[in-house]
Each structure stands twice: as C-alpha cells, then as structure tokens.
Amino acid sequence: MRPPEDELELRERSRTRDGETHLLDRRLFFQLLAFTGARSSAALRGALERSGASAVLYEDLADPAGVAVLTLAERPEILVEELRPLYNEDPFTELVARPELTMIGRTYSLGFEDDLEEALLARPRRRVLDPANRWAIWYPLRRAPRFEQLDAAEQHQIMAEHGSVARAFGQAGVVADVRLSCHGLDRHDNDFVIGLLGPELAPLSKLVQAMRKTRQTAEFLDRIGPFFVGRAVWQSEM
C-alpha cells in the first residue's frame, strides 16, 4: 500500500541527544571503477586533474597493470554527464574495464548524528581525499534476509557490537571508514559498500579480520566482496 505523500520522507533524518530532529536532502554518491592494462598512471592522473572531478586514483595491489578511480559527487548526474565522456577518451580507452569490481553507493544517516552535513558530506569527502589515507580496501556486502526479521532491539545490539570494533581502530587513528548504501544501485543486489582507509595497509586488514568475529559477520552476512585493495597515487583537493 502506498503511503500518503505527507508520510513519505526521502530526506536523511537524525535525532540528536537533546531530542531535536534534523532533516537533510543532501548526500554524496560514490563510484569506484576499476581497469587493467595501465602501464603507467601518469597520463590518467593528468586526465583526472584536468577534469576537475573530486576523485582518487588507486593503483591495484593485486594487479600490476590495475588501477581504479573513485569519484564522488552530490549530484549523480555528474557521474554520467561529466565523467562518462572522460572514460570514453584517451588515455582511459586504452584500458580494459573490470566491471566485477564496480561499486556504487550513497552516504546515508544512521539516525543519531548531531550534524548531518558533517556526517553525510564533509566527513566522507575529507576521509577519502586526505593525503594521509593512502591505502584503501573497498568492498560490497549483502546482509542475510533474516537480519531484517529481527526486532529493532536485537538489530541495534548486533550493530553496536560491530560498530565498537571499527570505533576502536578509528580512535587509534589507524583506520577511517566510509559506509555507503547501495540498495538498488548495485548490479549484484548488495546492500552496502564499505571503504577502509588509512596510512598503512596492515591495520585495514586486521580490522577486516577482527570483524569476522562479530555476530553480524558470522551470522548475518549473505555475501561479502569482491575486495579492491589499492594505494592512492593521486587525490583531488578537498
């Protein structure tokens, strides 16, 4: 049954500690496109710089000729109208796309942020474009359908355990994360895209390992991956 128009809320929503409700109809869209056949990343860096896109160019740890471009924009039209022509011109036409590693997602509210603009726009942009965060692990995941059948209290308990692990790595200053929703945006019907970023690769891997012990990962993930692991060789300015 379709909800009345006055009940359909498409804006991001949060409720602060003082009980105030905040709404924001803005978010960032992220797109990760991977390629192989890149003998040098210098020409790709030049093309991205000239485009003016908010982007990161990664060299693929698992493929000596692999690269990936992470782009972000408030308007998803930019990913098509401005960046699609870029990928259909040299030097990108010399590469071979790897669609199995394509990831698309949008920032979203968890419901308790004190500052939605910071959480949805400023913080994710700052984290991916921070020159200190040279290493990245990006991966999609899909929750098992039975997770949605749990009551809200049990869901919150499971997510709190999972979040506490990531928070410990974040407070230590070794991992910054970006969480994206990709419901309906992913050809494989994943639910989320996760980005783990940091100055060193080992802590990112250790966080993935630590997450395996949480109840969410052990019991309520239907699938996870594929993983893209790369090192940033160029980032646009924040």
Image (tube, helix red, strand yellow):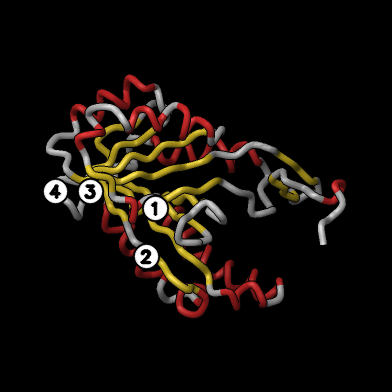
Closer to the observer: label 1 or label 3?
3
**Dots 3 and 2: beta carbons under 8 Å?**
no
Dot 4 and dot 1 residues touching (CB under 8 Å): no
- Give the percent coordinates (x, y) of residue 43: 20, 27
Which residue carries the number 3 mark? 60
Q: Judge the density around disc 2: few (<14), some (14-19), many (≥20) Cα neighbours within 10 Å.
A: some
> Percent from the top left, x then y, of residue 190?
49, 61
Q: Alpha carbon of mark 4 to alpha carbon of mark 3: how far?
A: 7 Å
Of the image marks 1 and 3, the number of the one nearer the N terminus: 3
Question: Which quadrant of the structure image shows residue 54?
Answer: top left
Pointers 1 and 2 in contact (C-beta within 8 Å): yes
For the N terminus, the image quarter is bottom right
According to the image, label 2 marks what residue?
208
Tag 4 residue? 64
Q: Give the crowd class for mark 4: few <14, some 14-19, many >=20 residues within 10 Å.
A: few
Which of marks 2 and 4 precedes in the sequence? 4
Of 84 and 18, nearer the camera is 84
Give the SS element for disc 2: helix
Pointers 1 and 3 in contact (C-beta within 8 Å):
no
